[in-house]
Amino acid sequence: MSEKILIIDDDLDTLRLVGLMLQRQGYQISASTNGQQGLEKAFEEDPDLILLDIMMPDMDGYEVARRLRQNPATAETPILMFTAKTQLDDKVIGFEVGANDYLTKPTHPSELQARIKTLLARVNEKKAIADLDKDENRGYVVGVLGARGGLGTTTVAVNLGAGLRSRTKAEVIVAEMLPGQGSLAMDVGVTSFNGLVDLLSINKLSETTRERVRETLVQHKSGLKFLLASDRPRDMQLINQIANYEVIVRRLSALARFLVLDLGVGIQPFAEKILPFCNEVLVVVEGVPNTILHARALIDDIAAFGMGRKNIKVILNNRIRSDTQLPSSQVQAKLEHEILSTLTPAPEVFAQASSVQTPAILCQPESLTARQITKVVEHVTEQEALPR
């Protein structure tokens, strides 16, 4: 359905000419010749945008805008003031009473069309995000991030996802969140890895539909579904598409019972939107003093975004056999935060898993590594079963 624009103007020539021009652009047009009538139509018809003159005899545009903003039905409706009043003070008053944009007469039709198109695009994006709150049956979202690079964050994420899939037989999605730094595609033998980049490149959030997100997912032989990031460094520039990230995660969470997010290292630009959406966050550390210091600061930062500390869990991943790594009891004491599970070095297990392009927990289900990961899986399924 095309957008509806309400024009409130006592100048009949403006109503006729502007109305006809906008109709030719595909918009539905409603018109009013005075302020009171305009208010009544706005409340009854719920237009997508209001084109409002200021100088009208019974009620000027400033008062109309004030009343529109006072009514919940029109409090968020975009208002474009289109008037012959050109003084700076007039514009300032217009914005103070609630106008979203201000354009003086006369103007070129293409500029008016561009201003209207921009305002409608903004409101459509807001509606798209608001509609996400209506999604039902959202899954349980687990964020996984490392205190620093090279700690096996992706490995923990994919093995957790595989364990959840094996244990519950439910839909599980594992999503890489860092464009330009994807590594999972090669590990699991997948050649299509542009899903995240494609979604972050969408200009109109309203086009990030649940079905479009579903189409970007890659089905793996393990039963997992992946949203994969590319490994092209230039794609890293998309990391600042914050609004896209929020929509993507919300859509993904409506497509599976469990959503595991590989959030990379530290606090990324999208963290403010994504971390509060997680039901819990797993922080991957290793038993090295410097990393422990980073992890403590990271836990504080995550908590500052509104995540309760009880929902922040630590995974100690000792990837190599070394006397320099501290035991889990000392790491926990230095972190002042409970360690959920410790992964002991198992290079042979992960090498075999990589060779057959299958998560280690499925490649060797009886191994010590599988049992250690299963402890995390059991924790997540127990938490997911609790009332939310």
Image (cartoon, helix red, strand yellow):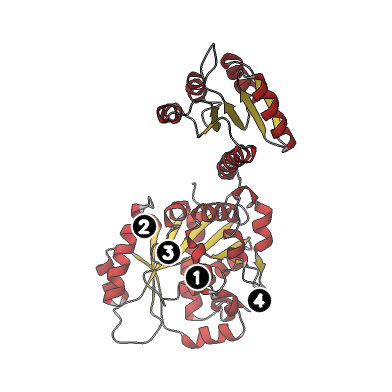
| Mark linked to residue 282 | 3
Residue 159 in the image: above or below residue 127: below
Nearer the camera: disc 2 or disc 4: 4
Query: Camera-side residue: 24 or 273?
Result: 24
Taking the spot 60% from the left edge, 77% from the top edge, the residue there is: 188
Q: Secondary structure at mark 3?
A: strand
| Mark linked to residue 374 | 1
Earlier in the chain: of badge 2 and badge 1, it is 2
Give the image location of residue 100, x and y in percent.
50, 34
Nearer the camera: disc 1 or disc 4: 4
Residue 156 in the image: above or below residue 125: below
Is the N terminus in the top left, top right, bottom left or bottom right quadrant?
A: top right
Give the image location of residue 258, x and y in percent.
56, 59
Taking the spot 39% from the left edge, 62% from the top edge, the residue there is: 267
Q: Secondary structure at mark 1?
A: helix
Give the image location of residue 363, x and y in percent.
58, 80
Crowding at label 2, few (<14), some or many (≥20) Cα neighbours within 10 Å?
many
Contact? badges 2 and 3 (CB < 8 Å): no
Earlier in the chain: of badge 2 and badge 4, it is 4
To which residue does mark 4 refer? 191
Nearer the camera: disc 1 or disc 3: 3
Q: Is residue 197 visible?
A: yes
Three-letter amino acid code at disc 2?
A: Ile
Earlier in the chain: of badge 3 and badge 4, it is 4
